[in-house]
Image (cartoon, rainbow, N blue to C red):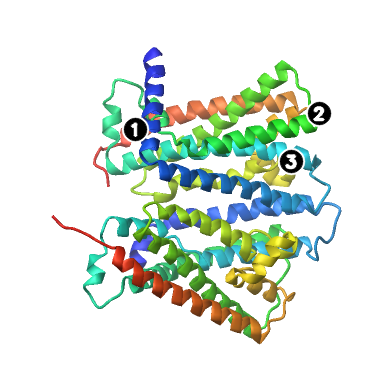
Amino acid sequence: MKKYWHLFWHFRKVDFMRMMEYRTDFVFWLIVSLMWTAFNYFFFFLIFGTTESVAGWSHQELVIVLSFFTMIDALTWSVFYANMTQYTQSVFSGELSKYLLQPVSTIFLLTTQRMSYNNIPRFLIGLIVLVITAVKMDISVSMMELALIVVLFICGAVFIYSGWFILATLSLWVDKLQNINDIMPGFRRVYQIPRQVFTGVTALTFTFIFPLGLITSLPSEILTGKNPPVLLILYFIVATTCLALTARAFFKYSIKQYSSVGG
Amino acid sequence: MFIRSLQFRTELVIYVLLDILPFFVLFFVWQAAFSGKTEINSFTLPQITQYYFLVMIIERVTSTYFENWRATEIREGKIDYFLTRPFSYINDVFSKDVGGKLVSLAISLPGLAVAFFLISLVLPVAPLSVAPHQIFIFIFFMITGYLIQFMIALWIVLLTFWFEGSSGLEHFKWISVSLFSGAMIPTTFMPTWIQSVYQFLPLKYIFAVPITYLQGTLSLTPGMFLELAIALLCMFGITRVFWHYALYQYSSAGG
């Protein structure tokens, strides 16, 4: 465990050195990241500005959902995208072999070795807006609720990461699929809004079958005192655990397909 | 090129699905916003749905995605070939992008047509009743919209001659086009200051003008066509000047 901890921080150090090497690039992407964050908030302000509430969520409550989304989105581009791109490229080029030969878990290497610092301000903006809105709304949460919010937020991140890892692992089965890493970000819009916005079959799909709708909704509901059903919270935690285990099992099974030739 | 595109048809299917998904999510957002209302800013829910469906089609036709790899090509000094041949680099960018786009449209538009049919079965989409001349004008605007997007993309590529990291400027393009063209939201929903910028820029001819024209809420005037023609000419002129000065910045060495 100590070895993995040490490796994790070593990777972060390398990432930091890489960032310092291209400082202008870092500043540039920082601006781009901030622009997208502002754009996302602005877009929803325009839509939600036309009505008093959306699916039972007031404007300020919607800002809380958007803030959780902003933080998850920062992780998406900083951690998930960077690693998954590296992973699929290493499969297509045949470089995956070098990870397989290392005396550490291949999944650990594939999922932690890259991180971009460009989106850290985006994460902080999400957090600051979240705190400011919570203070404005005079929200008070117990330590238990706060812990649950953190657990659900982590679950949300693990859910996306596991789903993405399964999709990226599909690269071991196909000849070449350049946009395989665009699929999971394509679903971001689903958890940008409260789950109650969806109706009918779509609501069923995004709540139970592929519970993306719960990623930002559940922590937001707890924070705003909407009291989501306990069973739904448990379901999401179990679904996330199952997806993470499936991702691991699928990788172990799919790696047998790997020929190390590249393409 | 057609065979190469067919080889990557799974990628095309994924792109079409990724185009449709945000449209679906947006529909639910608007459905929630329209709850208890029949009209917002002179739009009904079926009209808004129709608006975003047309956005999706125009986006597929007019968007360009060559900025990144073309910028890399210049940065790595791989355009020498065009500087010694009687075929301009810009012509190469244009012809390859148009060719690739035509092939991808030939494959993806039938898919979008089927998607529209299925969507209209499950979602309230206002039916389009348009005369043939309106369709021609709509296609004309899609072509000019493509030219506008192409030239902006080309400016980003040409900036590589001066700045190393210009490929990321495509994000500025996406944000600007989304904000000031009517792709993000119908312009009547925009704050006044954005509407002022929108009126000033030619980006409105990519999405807002053709869509509202087709929806019957905008009457075209000769002045609009003149404005569009002047904007295109100016953009073309800027592109020529850009290319002229960019060449002085270029150096490549073999070895």
Q: Secondary structure at mark 2?
A: loop
Chain of the residue displaying label 3: A
Per the image, the residue denoted by label 1 is: A255
Instruction: Give residue B169's position: percent from left, percent from top.
Output: 47, 55
Instruction: Give residue A223's position: percent from left, percent from top.
Output: 74, 28
Q: Is residue A55 above or below residue B44?
A: above
Chain of the residue displaying label 1: A
- Identified by mark 1, the residue type is Ile
Mark positioned earlier in the residue sequence (3 or 1): 3
Mark positioned earlier in the residue sequence (1 or 2): 2
Mark positioned earlier in the residue sequence (3 or 2): 3
Per the image, the residue denoted by label 2 is: A138
Q: Which quadrant of the rendered structure holds the N terminus of chain A?
A: top left
Give the distance between the C-alpha atoms of the residues marked 1 and 2, in whole angstroms: 51 Å
Question: In which quadrant of the rendered view does residue B142 lie?
Answer: bottom right
Mark 1 residue crowding within 10 angstroms, few (<14) / some (14–19) / many (20+): some
Q: Residue shown at 76%/22% (left/top)?
A: A141
Q: Secondary structure at mark 3?
A: helix
Near-viewer residue (B146 or A190): B146
Q: Is residue B70 above or below residue A166?
A: below
Instruction: Give residue B24's position: percent from left, percent from top.
Output: 65, 53
